[in-house]
Amino acid sequence: MNARMIVELMPFAIVFLIIAVFGYFMLMIAKIERKVLKDDVLCTNPERVRSANQTLKVLRLLAPIEIGAILLLVIFAIDHYYHLFRINPVGVGITAGGLLFTYIGILFSNSNTDKKARYTGTCEGVVVGISEHEDSDGNTTYSPVIKYMVNGNEYTCGSGISTGRRQVPEEGTKMNVYYDPQWPKEAESDFERKIGVQFPVWFLAFGVPMILIGLMILTFGKELLRML
């Protein structure tokens, strides 16, 4: 392997290392959570067991992205040096981005379906506060904090989704809360359910057209360049 080849493949090696480290941490977390499920002492804590199952479920959803990223990187590295496939990187990038958006949209849709199947209990809750969330760019979004009662016990649920201030109900507003009868502290409100339904639509609306555009570039890339 000459110096030129090493320099050309260095960016691919760095990206591969980052992906590999991420995959290593995924495997370590999965190993810990599986041990929790097998450990008789820890299994006496049902909440910890439930948390382990949920973590493993998320890792299983992330695994196809990790594998796909590695395969794509290897293909790009081979094509860059040996020019075997003569891949159009723009077409591949757009298609891969579209697949990722579509995959995330499907995950959101499956998550919504799973929550509706589990959160079969219903009660009335009241907004008792507004949470503020500031991102790295200084933009602030908001989500309601809702108090509700189940079997005489008081619970509070926030929201994994935050929006603009105008979309968040004011304090004192009453709304339905949907909870897991076996784990009443796991719940979502009308606010989160309404906003959450929109997420799959947004991601699929971006993902599917990107896939089609990417495939067109891969198939007719040279012809399109001549037309331009």
Image (cartoon, helix red, strand yellow):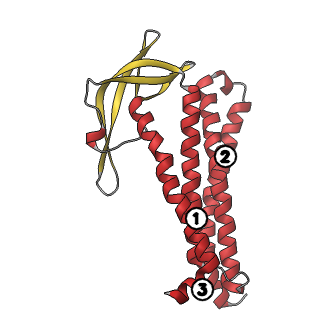
Give the percent coordinates (x, y) of residue 50: 61, 29
Q: Which residue is mark 2?
A: 60
Question: Picture coordinates of residue 227 (x, y %)?
Answer: 52, 87
Type of the residue with mark 3: Lys
Mark 2: which amino acid? Arg
Amino acid carrying label 1: it is: Ile
**Residue beneath label 3, please?**
222
Q: Which residue appears at 73% of the width and 83% of the height? A: 84
Q: Between marks 1 and 3, how big is the CA–CA gap?
A: 18 Å
Q: In the image, is 123 to the left or to the right of 137?
A: right
Residue pictured at 65% horizontal, 83% vertical: 80
Mark 3: few, some, or many residues within 10 Å (few <14, many ≥20)? few
Q: Secondary structure at mark 1?
A: helix
Rendered image: mark on residue 211: 1
Q: Quadrant of residue 88?
A: bottom right
**Mark 2 or 1, nearer chain start:** 2
Quadrant holding the N terminus: bottom right
